[in-house]
Image (cartoon, grey):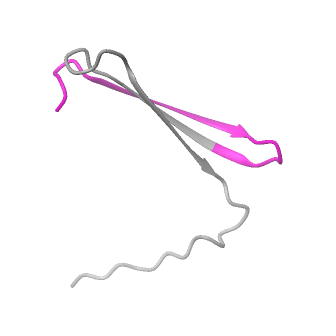
Amino acid sequence: PYGGDAVLTEHYARVSGQQDDEYLLVTRILEDPQYLNAPYVRTVQFRKQDDASGWNPTPCSAR
């Protein structure tokens, strides 16, 4: 559940790592005075791959 005054804010940052790795940081802040005593903050990080070796998309089909 969430209250009527709930606010979700997202921040995106592109940062460099120690070995010239590139990362995308996504920080989400949920503020809900009805259900939360403090902001609920979570950050996830995604590392950019040098090539498409981990990416092998296939077309979808309807059944």
The quadrant in which residue 56 appears is bottom right
- The image quadrant where one finds the N terminus is top left
- The magenta region covers 1-23
Question: x%, y% of residue 30?
Answer: 35, 26
Residue reaching furthest to the front: 37
User: Residue visible at 73% across and 62% down?
Assistant: 50
Residue reaching furthest to the right: 19
Question: x%, y% of residue 26?
Answer: 52, 38
User: Residue visible at 17% across and 23% down?
Assistant: 3
Position of residue 42 in the picture relative to residue 45 (left or right): left
9 w.r.t. 37: above or below: below
44 w.r.t. 42: above or below: below
4 w.r.t. 14: above or below: above
User: Residue visible at 19% across and 17% down?
Assistant: 34
Position of residue 30 in the picture relative to residue 32 (left or right): right
Which is nearer the eye, 33 or 48?
Answer: 33
Question: x%, y% of residue 49?
Answer: 68, 60
User: Residue visible at 66% across and 54% down?
Assistant: 48
